[in-house]
Image: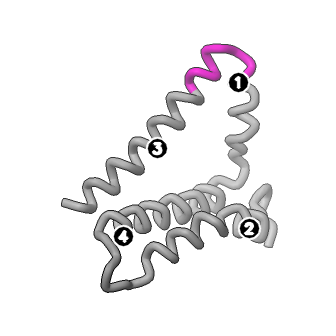
Amino acid sequence: MQIHNFNLKREAVRLLPVMAVAGLILIPDSSSAVVWFAMGISLLLVGMSHLLRKFLFPYLDLERFAEKASETAVGAAIIFASVAYILSTIISSSISLLR
């Protein structure tokens, strides 16, 4: 299935490791910790939001924007700050699930 720049098979292969880890973490177990469950939910949400963004905005190529932005020091700093913000949001959402 190809919609503009969205290739479902390619995206599924890219997300397979993330979804596999999320699935393994979410398998019910009597000894599984709540923290692992929250991390599994967060990973699952990240993977699903990636697919949703690719499906809704197939023409938006973030890799091209990142390559262009990394040509300057300020652009590279913005990319670094954005990645740090996304990671802190994932951690924050995991912690809020624990409450």
Q: Nearer the viewer, mark 4 or mark 2?
A: 4
Q: Secondary structure at mark 3?
A: helix
Residue 53 at x, y percent in the picture: 59, 56
Distance Cα–Cα, label 1 vs label 4:
35 Å
State the mark number for residue 87: 3
At label 4, counting other C-alpha atoms closer than 10 Å, the crowd grade (few under 14, some 14-19, many 20 or more) is: many
Magenta segment, prevailing SS (helix, strand or loop): helix
**Chain-order first, disc 1 or disc 4:** 4
Membership of 84 in magenta stretch:
no
Q: How is the image coloured?
A: one colour
Q: Position of residue 32 (x, y in %)?
A: 34, 76
Q: Residue at x 46, y 44 (%)?
A: 87
Identify the amino acid type marked 1. Ser
Label 2 crowd (10 A; few <14 / some 14-19 / many >=20): few
Q: Residue at x 63, y 20 (%)?
A: 75
**Which of the 4 image quarters holds residue 3?**
bottom right
Residue 57 image label = none
How far apart in space, not on screen, are marks 4 and 3 (Cα)? 17 Å
The residue that label 1 is drawn on is 70
Q: Earlier in the sequence, mark 1 or mark 2?
A: 2
Q: What's the magenta region?
A: 69-78
Amino acid marked by disc 2: Val
Q: Which residue is mark 4?
A: 37
Q: Quadrant of the C terminus?
A: bottom left
Q: Hey, what amino acid is under mark 4? A: Phe
* In the depicted structure, whether residue 65 falls above or below residue 25: above
Residue occupied by mark 2: 13
Quadrant for residue 7, please give it: bottom right
Answer whether labels 2 and 3 touch (C-beta < 8 Å). no
